[in-house]
Amino acid sequence: MAELKPLSKEAIPHAQERAERYRLLNEPLHAESIYLDILSADPGNHAATIGLVLSLTDQFRDGTSHGLEHAREQVRDLPSEYEQAYYSGIICERWGSAQLAKGVPGYAAVDWFREAMRSYETAEALSPPDNAEAILRWNACARIIERTGAVQPRPAAPGFESPAQGEMPLE
């Protein structure tokens, strides 16, 4: 691999704008690359960490699974418990949605949505009263599960990766 060129700290704001634009243009690989450059220049850059998580999860629908664990690693470095819970939910929800987009049966994705819902419940408990993001995402997951008709998760089987064990009632 060629040696990567470093990004100067002065170039970070413009690079951040470029990365956001690439995400909006549905070019998550380009966005991911820019966020990695930003984080190389400024390892604690909060906005770049969140952007990297989102650009990695944007790639799930393209069948890219390499970002699943990388996104989870980035979330562990977020400074607040709320953000850790909320973005963990985003990762699981987007992975579940990617499974549905691939045409897999709903029961194959339901555990991911349930795990997302658990994360959103944690985030909701940690959020201020005027922040309804976790509630809105939880409700979206519940509706997706209802639409797929897969209210009960399938039993664990060899080769099936479930994010967690346990049930979450949809009440």
Image (tube, helix red, strand yellow):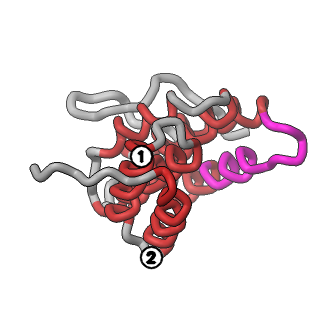
Element assignment for label 2: loop
Residue at coordinates 43% horizontally, 56% vertically from top-left? Answer: 55
Residue 54 pos. (x, y %): 48, 53
Q: CA distance from mark 2 to mark 1?
A: 27 Å
Circle 2 crowding by C-alpha within 10 Å: few under 14, some 14–19, many from 20: few
Looking at the image, is mark 2 or mark 1 nearer the viewer? 2
Residue at coordinates 37% horizontally, 70% vertically from top-left? Answer: 27
Instruction: Look at the picture and state if 4 lies above or below 165.
Output: below
The type of residue carrying mark 2 is Leu
Residue 102 or residue 1, whichever sits in front: 1
Give the mark nearer the N terminus: 2 vs 1. Answer: 2
**Does residue 60 appear left or right of residue 124 in this picture?**
left
Instruction: Look at the picture and state if 100 lies above or below 73.
Output: below
Q: Which residue is mark 1?
A: 109
Residue 155 part of the magenta segment:
no
From this viewpoint, is residue 109 visible? yes
**Quadrant hosting residue 122:** top right
The type of residue carrying mark 1 is Ala
Stretch of the chain drawn in magenta: 127-141
Residue at coordinates 32% horizontally, 61% vertically from top-left? Answer: 29
Residue 22 pos. (x, y %): 43, 70
Prevailing secondary structure of the magenta residues: helix
In the picture, the quarter occupied by the C terminus is: top right
Q: Are marks 2 and 1 in contact (CB under 8 Å)?
A: no
Element assignment for label 1: loop
Q: Which residue is mark 2?
A: 25
Residue 43 pos. (x, y %): 46, 37
Residue 65 or residue 41, whichever sits in front: 41
